[in-house]
Image: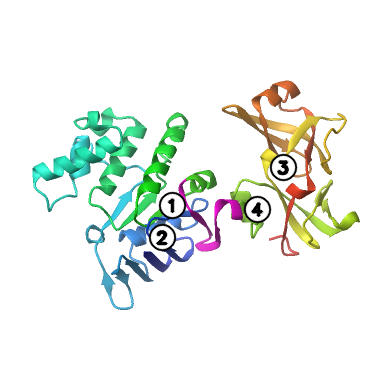
Amino acid sequence: MLAAAVETRLRHLELAVELEVESGRCIALAGPSGAGKTSFLRAVAGLLSPERGRVECDGGVWLDTGRGVDVPPEARGCGVLFQQYALFPHLTAWRNVAFGLHESDRAARRSRALELLERFGIGGLAEARPAELSGGERQRVALARALAREPTALLLDEPLAALDATTRAAAMRELAAVVAATDVPTLLVTHEFAEASLLADEIAIVDGGRIVQRGTASALSAEPASAFVADFAGASVLVGLAAPGPDGLTVVELDGGGRVTSTDLVNGPVAVAAYPWEIALEPAGATAESSALNHLRATVSSVTVIGNRARVGLAAPQQFAAEVTGASLMRLGLEPGAAVTATFKATATRLIPRPANGS
């Protein structure tokens, strides 16, 4: 078990985060840049000394500001995978992996390093230096180094951020397999919900130095506690005023114009969340073929192709997005300036109460 509670004043915010991670599980601390998540991880690793805090792992106390305990980073027994990997450029791959194994002789260090490099499929690159490795290969070397001392906890700081889009997907799958097979508590810091969803058992979303909601990826997507969480989880978020409608449904008059219907029962100011892949597009004026109740007129503002699908930015009185297949993109002739109708079901329309002042 890794248990950490950290409170400290950072330059731009008050950080107050408390987390527990059980052995064999991965918890993602996820949120936007500047939310305080990396500072929390650094405090756990011993790279930042907070004003107040306590960190325990595997029965040992790493930090207790009340008793003046602050174990140095190298004695905490945790493996850290840094965002930029922090490999020594003058050392070969196996020497980078073996660097922290000071208590072993050279033969044992080399044997352990080669074993891990083979495990990650890069045993043949043991004599290569970091400059000779691809981004994905450098990540695997850094991960092998983090696991070399059989750590009591694994800390991952934006582990995929340094990779290009081509390498990223494969590296994410490899990292997910390693995390799943690691029988220690794993703390992941990331600014991407999709990355957290794949790698972590649970996600703690942090904003402004506080955890605002924690749960599985599916639970956070289905029941976001705020418009911020819904937006971070990938939903298109609109705002409006909800009131009871016909047939036990709720009708929302959107700010700036437009109306949507939801099965959620909410009254008053709301945020409306709908996921882009649940929004269908048809040319403006086309006859609706589905039973969906929500039809919003919009103009295509952008088209971003991602593999075999495309994210379509939509300009209406409020901005939102839809996601379609590449085939639909071609069939509909979607391009900036095209007039479309966005259609989605009432059951796919989540309503989140918000303060009357809109904050």
The reply, left or right, for residue 250 in relation to residue 115 is right
Placement of 148 over or under 163, stated as above or below:
below
| Mark linked to residue 222 | 4
Q: CA distance from mark 2 to mark 4?
A: 27 Å
Mark 2 touching mark 1, by CB under 8 A?
yes
Q: CA distance from mark 3 to mark 1?
A: 29 Å
Callout 4, which amino acid? Ala
Query: SS class of the residue under badge 1?
Result: strand
Task: Point out the frontmost of discs 2 and 1.
Answer: 1
Task: Point out the frontmost of discs 1 and 4.
Answer: 4
| Mark linked to residue 40 | 2
Span colored in magenta: 199-219
* N-terminal-most mark, 3 or 1: 1
Q: Which residue is mark 3?
A: 319
Rendered residue at 65%/57% (across/down): 223
Q: Can residue 245 be seen?
A: no
Which image quarter is the N terminus in? bottom left
